Image: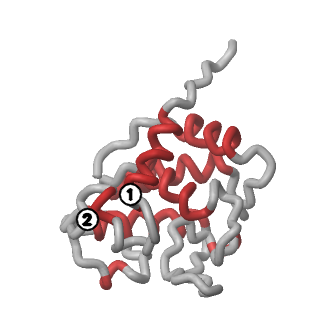
Amino acid sequence: MGTSALTPQQMADFVKKKNPRNVRLEGVTVEELAKLFVVIGAKEGVRGDVAFAQALKETGYFSYKGDVLPRQHNYAGIGTVGNGVKGHTFRSPFQGVTAHIQHLKAYASTDKLNMTLVDPRFRYVKRGSAPTWPALQGKWAMQPRGNYGNDVLAIYKEMEQTKLRVAKK
């Protein structure tokens, strides 16, 4: 929970550095998607920049080599359980980011939503059961080794090192 510390441009630049040739988003640029995470995160009080790092983990830096397809706008793997199960499909990038942010809020907080409910799995989450990223281990994704939340934070810390670009006059 909290306010994003990174700019959407830093976030987008990081993706382009990590995945320069295979960003497979539909209906949105990586810059626009990063901005959606920051803006929607702010509306719900969720760190949109760290949620974006989670999207990078879930989608392989938007290369989509798992079960979810780019056209699903499902940046968090909501409803995906492996073995070809595609999970939920959202109508737009806005709706997909909103569902992702709301799903995180369900785990991190017991506060009410500030936006209309979009997340189809919100009601299945024990509210406030994972107030930290490491506490998501075994709740968000069944990762066989390591710690899911720590992996997300490692991506964030690397993204945080992306230099801000200064506009030239």
From the viewer's perspective, tell me whether residue 67 is left or right of residue 122.
right
Residue in front for this viewpoint, 162 or 31: 162
Secondary-structure class at tag 2: loop
Q: CA distance from mark 2 to mark 1?
A: 10 Å
| 119 over 59 or under it: above or below | below
Q: Which quarter of the rendered picture does the C terminus lie within? A: top right
Q: Residue at x 72, y 64 (%)?
A: 26
Q: CB under 8 Å between callouts 2 and 1?
A: yes
Nearer-N-terminus badge (2/1)? 2
Residue 106 visible in the snapshot: yes
Q: Residue at x 50, y 46 (%)?
A: 155
Which scheme is used to colour this image of the protein? Answer: secondary structure
| 142 over 94 or under it: above or below | below
Instruction: Looking at this view, name the residue that lies furthest to the front.
Output: 145
Image mark for residue 12: none
Residue in front for this viewpoint, 40 or 19: 19
From the viewer's perspective, tell me whether residue 116 is left or right of residue 86.
left
Q: Residue at x 35, y 66 (%)?
A: 137
Local packing at callout 1 (Cα closer than 10 Å; few below 14, some 14-19, many 20+) is: some
Which amino acid does the dot numbered 2 rest on?
Answer: Ala
Examine the image and state in which quarter residue 145 appears.
Answer: bottom left
Which amino acid does the dot numbered 1 rest on?
Answer: Gly
Which residue, given by chain and number where applicable, does mark 1 sit on?
A: 149
Secondary-structure class at tag 1: helix
Q: Residue at x 66, y 58 (%)?
A: 62
Q: Nearer the viewer, mark 2 or mark 1?
A: 1
Residue 90: percent from the left, percent from the top?
Answer: 57, 76
Which residue, given by chain and number where applicable, does mark 2 sit on?
A: 130
Residue 115 visible in the snapshot: no
